[in-house]
Amino acid sequence: MKRLVVGIALLTTSACSGPWEPLVDLKASEDETARTMQEDLMECEWLTDRYGDGDEQEVRRCMQGRGHSVLN
Protein backbone atom coordinates (compact mmCIF):
# COMPACT_ATOMS: atom_id res chain seq x y z
CA MET A 1 0.00 0.00 0.00
CA LYS A 2 2.85 2.35 0.84
CA ARG A 3 4.41 1.80 -2.60
CA LEU A 4 1.10 2.60 -4.28
CA VAL A 5 0.83 5.92 -2.45
CA VAL A 6 4.44 6.81 -3.30
CA GLY A 7 3.88 5.83 -6.94
CA ILE A 8 0.78 7.99 -7.22
CA ALA A 9 2.57 10.91 -5.59
CA LEU A 10 5.46 10.63 -8.06
CA LEU A 11 3.11 10.47 -11.03
CA THR A 12 1.15 13.53 -9.97
CA THR A 13 4.26 15.62 -9.31
CA SER A 14 5.95 14.58 -12.55
CA ALA A 15 2.85 15.55 -14.52
CA CYS A 16 3.11 19.08 -13.18
CA SER A 17 6.77 19.53 -13.92
CA GLY A 18 7.45 20.24 -17.53
CA PRO A 19 9.02 22.90 -19.66
CA TRP A 20 8.13 26.40 -18.56
CA GLU A 21 5.76 28.24 -20.83
CA PRO A 22 4.81 31.85 -20.28
CA LEU A 23 1.25 32.71 -19.31
CA VAL A 24 0.40 35.60 -21.62
CA ASP A 25 -2.63 37.84 -21.17
CA LEU A 26 -3.60 38.27 -24.80
CA LYS A 27 -6.15 41.00 -24.12
CA ALA A 28 -3.57 43.09 -22.29
CA SER A 29 -0.94 42.61 -24.99
CA GLU A 30 -0.27 45.64 -27.15
CA ASP A 31 -2.08 46.17 -30.46
CA GLU A 32 -1.81 43.18 -32.79
CA THR A 33 0.74 41.20 -30.75
CA ALA A 34 -1.87 38.69 -29.59
CA ARG A 35 -1.96 37.26 -33.11
CA THR A 36 1.81 36.69 -33.15
CA MET A 37 2.21 35.28 -29.63
CA GLN A 38 3.14 31.71 -30.64
CA GLU A 39 5.57 32.87 -33.32
CA ASP A 40 7.19 35.36 -30.91
CA LEU A 41 7.50 32.65 -28.23
CA MET A 42 9.27 30.29 -30.62
CA GLU A 43 11.63 33.03 -31.76
CA CYS A 44 12.37 34.17 -28.19
CA GLU A 45 13.10 30.60 -27.08
CA TRP A 46 15.41 30.12 -30.06
CA LEU A 47 17.22 33.39 -29.44
CA THR A 48 17.74 32.76 -25.74
CA ASP A 49 18.91 29.18 -26.36
CA ARG A 50 21.32 30.32 -29.05
CA TYR A 51 22.68 33.55 -27.58
CA GLY A 52 21.83 33.46 -23.89
CA ASP A 53 21.26 31.08 -21.02
CA GLY A 54 17.86 29.97 -22.30
CA ASP A 55 16.28 30.57 -18.92
CA GLU A 56 12.75 31.68 -18.12
CA GLN A 57 13.70 35.26 -17.31
CA GLU A 58 15.33 35.82 -20.70
CA VAL A 59 12.32 34.40 -22.54
CA ARG A 60 10.02 36.55 -20.38
CA ARG A 61 12.03 39.71 -21.12
CA CYS A 62 12.08 38.91 -24.84
CA MET A 63 8.31 38.42 -24.89
CA GLN A 64 7.72 41.62 -22.93
CA GLY A 65 10.04 43.46 -25.29
CA ARG A 66 7.79 42.36 -28.14
CA GLY A 67 4.76 43.86 -26.38
CA HIS A 68 3.29 40.77 -24.67
CA SER A 69 1.87 40.92 -21.16
CA VAL A 70 3.56 37.95 -19.41
CA LEU A 71 1.91 37.07 -16.09
CA ASN A 72 4.29 34.42 -14.68
Image: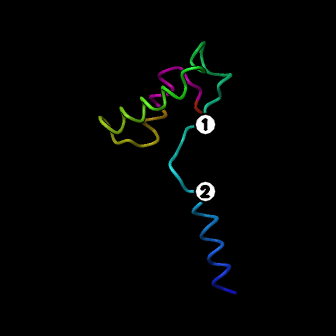
Amino acid type, label 2: Cys
User: Which range is magenta?
Assistant: 61-69
The amino acid pointed to by label 1 is: Leu
Residue 67: x and y, percent?
53, 20
The x and y percentages for residue 36 are 54, 21
Q: Nearer the viewer, residue 70 or 42?
A: 42
* Quadrant of the image occupied by residue 58: top left
Residue 16 lies, in percent from the top left, at: 60, 56
Q: Which residue is mark 2?
A: 16
Image height of 39 relative to 18, above or below: above
Residue shown at 66% from the left, 73% from the top? 8
**Which residue is at a point 59% across and 26% down the rendered structure image?**
69
Q: Quadrant of residue 37?
A: top right
Asked if residue 7 lies left or right of residue 51, the reply is right
Dot 1 crowding, Cα within 10 Å, few <14, some 14–19, many 20+: few
Name the residue at 54% across, 41% down.
21
User: Does the magenta-highlighted stretch encompass residue 34?
Assistant: no
